[in-house]
Image: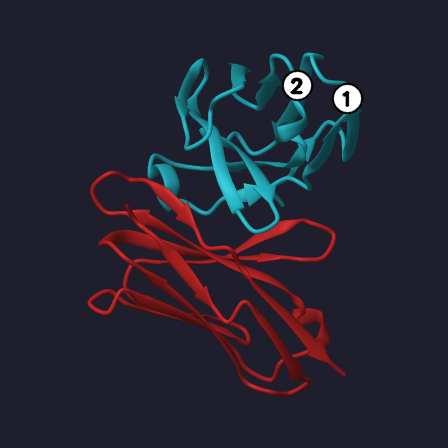
Chain colours: A cyan, B red
Amino acid sequence: DVKVTQSSRYLVKRTGEKVFLECVQDMDHENMFWYRQDPGLGLRLIYFSYDVKMKEKGDIPEGYSVSREKKERFSLILESASTNQTSMYLCASSFGTGRFRETQYFGPGTRLLVL
Amino acid sequence: KNEVEQSPQNLTAQEGEFITINCSYSVGISALHWLQQHPGGGIVSLFMLSSGKKKHGRLIATINIQEKHSSLHITASHPRDSAVYICSSISGGSEKLVFGKGTKLTVNP
C-alpha cells in the first residue's frame, strides 16, 4: 500500500514564526503536492513538484515556499506564519508523468492553527 | 476560467438507497477525478475519468464531455459511505486543477 505521512496531525504556532510541514511518501512517486483546505473554499493547490529540486506554483503560493531535496520528501514552509494561514494542509503524491492526470494518494492532513 | 459546481451540497439518504452526486464544469477538460473524504480528514481517490464510465464495487462514475457533466452513483448505499465527495477537473489546455466544494453525504441506518 502507498503510504503518505505528514509530520504532525495538529500544530499550533504564533504569528511570525517560521513553520515547516513535512511530507514523506514511500512509493518512489515522482509527483508531490501541497494543498490547503478551508470550509466553503474546498481544496486549493499551493505548490507541486514533479521531480527532485523541481517545483511549480499552484493557485495560492503567496506566503509559502517548498523544498524537495530528496524524492520521497516534500516540505512546505511558511516563512512568517499569519492567522490567515490557519487551515488544514494536505500532502499528496502520484506516480508518472501525467501531472494531474494520475491517481493521487493523500496524507492524513495537518491542522495548523496560527495564533 | 474553469468553474466546478457540485450538487447537491448536502445529501441525506436511508441505507440501501441509490445515490447520485453531480459535478458540472465550465470549460473543456482532459480528465476529472472523484475523491472521497471521511470525517477524520483522510482523502481517497475513487476514480479518474476522461470519457465514458467506470465502476468499482458499488460505485459508478460517468462523464459526458459534450455536456460538461459528471455523475457519481452509489448503489445500495451504506452508513460507511457517509463522507464528503469531491470532484476535480483538469482543464484541457492549461492543465489547471480545479476542485468543487464537495457534497456531504450522510447515510442513515
- Above or below: residue A55 compared with residue B14: above
Q: Are marks 1 and 2 on the same chain?
A: yes
Q: For the point 52% across and 44% down, which residue is it?
A: A43
First in residue order: circle 1 vs circle 2: 1
- Is A7 on the left or on the right of B91, as rendered? right
Q: Secondary structure at mark 1?
A: strand
Spot occupied by residue A29 in the image (x, y as percentages of width and height): 49, 32
Spot occupied by residue B77 in the image (x, y as percentages of width and height): 62, 80
Q: For the point 46% across and 47% down, which residue is it?
A: A103
Q: What is the count of numbered marks?
A: 2
Three-letter amino acid code at disc 1?
Lys
Question: How far apart are labels 1 and 2 at the CA level?
Answer: 8 Å
Marks 1 and 2 close (CB-CB < 8 Å):
yes
Q: Specify the subunit that label 2 lies on.
A: A
Residue B12 lies in what quarter of the image? bottom right
Q: Which residue is mark 1?
A: A13
Q: Secondary structure at mark 2?
A: loop
- Above or below: residue A52 compared with residue A97: above
Spot occupied by residue A71 in the image (x, y as percentages of width and height): 52, 21
Q: For the point 40% across and 44% down, which residue is it?
A: A102
Q: Nearer the viewer, residue B46 or A46?
A: A46
Residue A81: mark in rendering: 2
- Above or below: residue B59 compared with residue A79: below
Residue B3: mark in rendering: none
Spot occupied by residue B80 in the image (x, y as percentages of width and height): 71, 70
Q: Nearer the viewer, residue B72 or A13?
A: A13
Three-letter amino acid code at disc 2?
Ala
